[in-house]
Image (cartoon, rainbow, N blue to C red):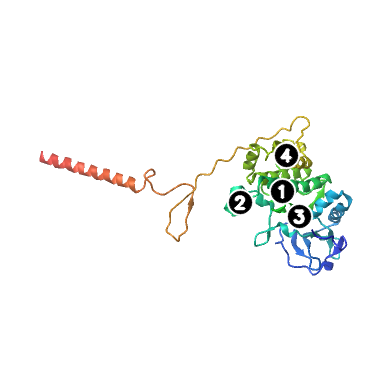
């Protein structure tokens, strides 16, 4: 874990020099994330569009939050997120970025040292085996999801909305099931921009509506469902969840289905309820259960894939139906039959003509 940030909570960009080469390609809201040369373990995240007074206030409140909440919640933010510790200025009153902690090395994987995104949990055990990877057990998946939801619980408990829950914004460690949520500096109170994310849209929060705590509940439940079932396709994941035993806890199945399928977004269970069930507790509904939307039917299985034979060394086309000639689908055998019939008819006609001429 990175030690405490030693400099002020508002700092000029020139005071952070020298900045090293960016670790990211400048996607999203930032132009880059740079290691701070004189302060190992800390990164300068520079914003694409500098923010005004409102952004400065929002970011300052995030920076100050850990000192105002309980020790357990503060520890979760410190160890499991890239929580901002300083606002970056550049000779003006605008917000040019923030200082954040680097993710610990235990979240890296493989020889290339890339971070293990939570995206990798959204695959089946067979997929892990095909790629030669160590497959997580059911217990591993539960522990990772429990730790992920613990972060979400802290945010919801303190009125913060993240909105950006998705595959690429959290890392996980195979050894201890710990997690690390990034891009957390975009959190805000009440509601925040409803970030466009393919396959993560909340059907009850259509844009241009802003994202709020109910949106976060849906997206966290969707992420957990995909990670527990190992299925990316929403329809397949929902069907797998509905047909499962909730990984040994049917209450887990029910709370996730209520969060994902409730017709009334206000009746989505809280993240604290989800966290309780993930930890092995009971799912206690009060009153009638929320009405749910229907689960879509499973997609039809894909047709079998066969390979068309090819000359060695040439590219092989992959087809969904076999085109290799056979007795059942035509080809040379059928042509031979047609030729035999044709010549038989010709011979018969010649015989008839010969007999007629000799009569």
Q: As drawn, is 243 to the left or to the right of 10?
A: left
Residue 190: name its quadrant: top right
**Tag nearer the camera, 3 or 2:** 2
Separation of disc 3 and disc 2 at Cα? 27 Å
Q: Secondary structure at mark 3?
A: loop
Question: Which residue does the numbered mark 3 point to in the structure image?
Answer: 183
Q: Are marks 2 and 4 in contact (CB under 8 Å)?
A: no
Residue sitting at x 79%, y 42%: 272
Q: Is residue 129 visible?
A: yes
Question: Which residue does the numbered mark 2 point to in the structure image?
Answer: 128
Q: Earlier in the sequence, mark 2 or mark 1?
A: 2
Separation of disc 2 and disc 1 at Cα? 17 Å
Q: Is residue 206 visible?
A: no
Question: Which residue does the numbered mark 1 point to in the structure image?
Answer: 144
Q: As drawn, is 84 to the left or to the right of 322?
A: right
Q: Residue furthest top?
A: 288
Q: Secondary structure at mark 2?
A: helix
Separation of disc 3 and disc 4 at Cα? 24 Å
Crowding near the residue tagged with mark 4, few <14, some 14–19, many ≥20 C-alpha atoms within 10 Å: many
Question: Which residue does the numbered mark 4 point to in the structure image?
Answer: 259
Q: How many labels sit on residues?
A: 4
Q: Earlier in the sequence, mark 3 or mark 4?
A: 3
Q: As drawn, is 38 to the left or to the right of 306?
A: right
């Amino acid at each position: 874990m990175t030690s405490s940030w030693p400099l002020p909570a508002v700092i000029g960009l020139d005071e952070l020099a020298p900045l090293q080469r960016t670790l990211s390609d400048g996607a999203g809201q930032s132009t880059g994330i740079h290691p701070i040369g004189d302060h190992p373990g800390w990164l300068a995240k520079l914003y694409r569009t500098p923010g005004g007074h409102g952004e400065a206030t929002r970011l300052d409140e995030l920076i100050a939050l850990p000192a105002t909440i309980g020790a357990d919640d503060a520890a979760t933010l410190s160890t499991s997120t890239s929580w901002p510790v300083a606002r970056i200025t550049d000779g003006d009153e605008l917000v040019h970025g923030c200082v954040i902690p680097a993710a610990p090395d235990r979240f890296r994987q493989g020889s290339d040292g890339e971070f293990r995104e939570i995206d990798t949990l959204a695959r089946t055990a067979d997929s892990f085996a095909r790629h030669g990877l160590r497959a997580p057990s059911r217990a591993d998946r539960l522990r990772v999801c429990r730790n992920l939801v613990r972060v979400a619980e802290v945010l919801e408990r303190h009125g913060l909305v993240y909105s950006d829950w998705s595959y690429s914004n959290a890392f996980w460690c195979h050894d201890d099931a710990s997690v690390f949520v990034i891009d957390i500096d975009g959190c805000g109170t009440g509601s925040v921009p409803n970030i466009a994310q393919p396959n993560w849209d909340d059907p009850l929060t259509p844009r241009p509506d802003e994202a709020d705590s109910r949106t976060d509940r849906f997206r966290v439940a969707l992420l957990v469902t995909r990670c527990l079932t190992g299925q990316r396709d929403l329809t397949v994941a929902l069907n797998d969840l509905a047909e499962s035993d909730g990984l040994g806890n049917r209450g887990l199945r029910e709370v996730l289905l209520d969060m994902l399928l409730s017709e009334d977004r206000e009746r989505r269970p809280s993240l604290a309820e989800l966290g309780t069930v993930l930890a092995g507790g009971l799912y206690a509904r009060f009153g009638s259960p929320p009405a749910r939307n229907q689960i879509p039917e499973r997609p039809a299985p894909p047709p079998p894939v066969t390979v068309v034979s090819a000359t060695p060394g040439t590219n092989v086309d992959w087809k969904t139906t076999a085109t290799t000639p056979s007795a059942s689908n035509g080809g040379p055998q059928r042509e031979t039959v047609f030729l035999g019939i044709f010549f038989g008819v010709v011979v018969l006609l010649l015989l008839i003509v010969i007999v007629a001429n000799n009569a």
